[in-house]
Amino acid sequence: MAYTYEPIATQTVSGVSSVSFTSIPSTYTDLKVVFSGYNDAPLMYINYNGSTSGYSTTFVGGNGSVAASARYGSPWLYVWAPGAGTYFNLSVDVMSYANTARWKSWICKGYITDNSGGPTLWVGTWASTAAINRVDIFTSSLTMSGNFTIYGIKAA
């Protein structure tokens, strides 16, 4: 089965601590958020519909010689943990985001682009059957700069 990626919105930011995508239509099967840029903070977070509860996250990563893993709960999905002051790329895929009969599952893939770290993978769930119509991404402190794009994915 082929899939079509349709850009819903793009934001280019500089020195901000949060980015919001609102009024997300429920006409797609999945969502994908892509970021390429710089982060001053040691952590970035994401939440859906403004909710700060019901999240469960598992992290695995490594740099070729050291591996790491961790589990996190609420209040937010931890999407990336770069060292402070790093350039990186990440993508967050949210499956069945508009389905009101199931919890939302997601996967985040990231990579630090300056070779100071390796790839990471975060997976998790949001224990809610609400259709996602808002995505907020923010830092734990300081700021982020770069390009964010949210895509709707349709099965062709």
Image (tube, helix red, strand yellow):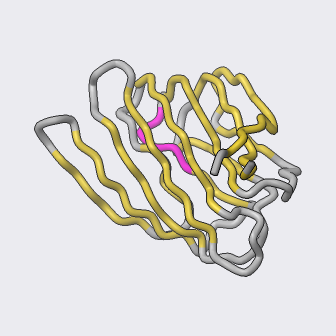
Q: Is residue 153 magenta?
A: no
Q: In the picture, residue 88 is in which quadrant?
A: top left
In terms of depth relative to the viewer, which is nearer, 22 or 85? 22
Residue at the bottom extreme, as displayed: 101
Q: Position of residue 94 (x, y in %)?
A: 62, 56
Q: Is residue 43 magenta?
A: yes
Q: Tell me which residue sits at (79%, 54%) in the image.
A: 28
In terms of depth relative to the viewer, which is nearer, 6 or 68? 6
Q: Tell me which residue sits at (47%, 35%) in the image.
A: 41
Q: Establish if 69 lies above or below 82.
A: below
Q: Tell me which residue sits at (35%, 43%) in the image.
A: 120
Q: Establish if 38 lies above or below 79.
A: above
Labels in figure, total: 0
In terms of depth relative to the viewer, which is nearer, 103 or 71? 103
Q: Which secondary structure is most common in the magenta stretch?
A: loop
In terms of depth relative to the viewer, which is nearer, 81 or 33? 33
**The residue stretch that appears in magenta:** 41-45
Q: Position of residue 134 (x, y in %)?
A: 78, 54
In the picture, measured across the screen, residue 130 lies left or right of residue 3, that is: right
Q: Position of residue 86 (x, y in %)?
A: 41, 25
Q: Position of residue 89 (x, y in %)?
A: 49, 30
Q: Tell me which residue sits at (51%, 44%) in the image.
A: 44
Residue at the left extreme, as displayed: 65
